[in-house]
Image: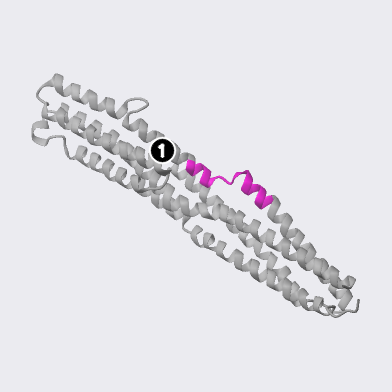
Amino acid sequence: MSGTRAFLVRRLIALLVVAAVAVAALLAAYYGVSRNSRAVSDESTPAILQVAAATDALSQSYRTAELSLGGSTSDVEGLGENYRDALSTANQNLAQAVKSTTGGTSAGQSLLTIAGLVSSYSDIIEQAYVNRTNNDLRDAYLSYAETMLKRHGDGILARLKKIQDRQFALLDQQTSFGWLLGCAWWVLVPVLFGTLAVLLVRTQRFLRHRFRRLVNPWLVAATALLISVVPLAVFTNQTQDRLVSARHSLHQTGIGRNGGPTAKKVAHVMRDTRWRADAVGYIPLGGAVLAALILIGLQPRIDEYRFQSR
């Protein structure tokens, strides 16, 4: 094998290997951010709002029940419409939260346990109403219901807070750039694509000198294709900004009472991230085109030395 052919073969292998590693690094780095946009929008946001709404509704249910039972119209109005609405809201949100995959199996089991406790809690409130004319018995049932709801550590609200804390911990992971993604975007991807660009430029200079041809259009196209990493980096930065904004919205106080507006705010912030996330599918395609351009650009030059005498 001639020296030129051996050099070109080695250069082709080097270009293809570096291109493959660079594209793989880009795919992992881009997917690492883009996948979280769907998780935050479709999973974490509704799950967090459902648990927050259930927590707020249960607290409201006890306050309204206590006021109703202490009022003079409890014989006529019963526990009141506000109590029934609050309890219904809590049960509906708990039922929706159970269906969520956020927090895993353990969170789902905990929510089922909480749903059972809420049923018992409502039965105790009903007993307080049944015994509304007996102040001591009524107050005893109310105290028991309050303890079940607010007991530190294993009360209903404490259990919901533990689930909410796990949800927020997961949200923070999903919306954090992290050192691994930072290393990929600020070190690995630039170094690999920079190395590939240098190799392509030096290869074109060699071909121009050795074969006396002004340009190799295939390698020029391959070099130009590397520029596509720039808009992908911009998309990643924009997606990350929106993830952080969504996290701030969900960490605000009062989201249990303002679930609808909060959900709309997060949806508005995240509305442009889906098509950016879909761009991840074009990275492997771009890698295949890049490899094809390199191969088409160099293989004919290698073939010119196929029948060199030994």
Find the residue positioned furthest to the front.
310
Whether residue 256 is visible, yes or no, is no
Instruction: Say which of 11 and 252 sits in front.
Output: 11
Quarter of the view holding residue 287: bottom right
Say left or right for 236 vs 63: right
Q: Residue at x 63, y 44 (%)?
A: 179
Question: Which portion, as a residue range, is magenta?
Answer: 170-186
Quarter of the view holding residue 194: bottom right
Find residue 217 and report its horizontal and vertical position in percent. Answer: 75, 77
Q: Is residue 16 above or below residue 143?
A: below
Instruction: Say which of 238 and 227 sits in front.
Output: 227
Find residue 138 and report its horizontal and vertical position in percent. Answer: 15, 24
Instruction: Say which of 286 and 176 sits in front.
Output: 286
| Colouring style | one colour
Specify whether residue 106 is painted magenta.
no
Find residue 236 and report its horizontal and vertical position in percent. Answer: 59, 55
Q: Residues within 10 Å of mark 1 (few under 14, many from 20)?
A: many
Q: Is residue 62 above or below residue 215?
A: above
Q: Residue at x 46, y 50 (%)?
A: 40
Whether residue 246 is visible, yes or no, is yes
Q: Which residue is mark 1?
A: 164
Q: Residue at x 67, y 48 (%)?
A: 183
Give amino acid for label 1: Gln
Say left or right for 40 vs 207: left
**How would you classify the magenta stretch by its main secondary structure?**
helix
Find residue 99 and report its horizontal and vertical position in percent. Answer: 34, 48
Say left or right for 206 vs 243: right
Q: Residue at x 76, y 59 (%)?
A: 195
**Figure quadrant of the C terminus:** bottom right
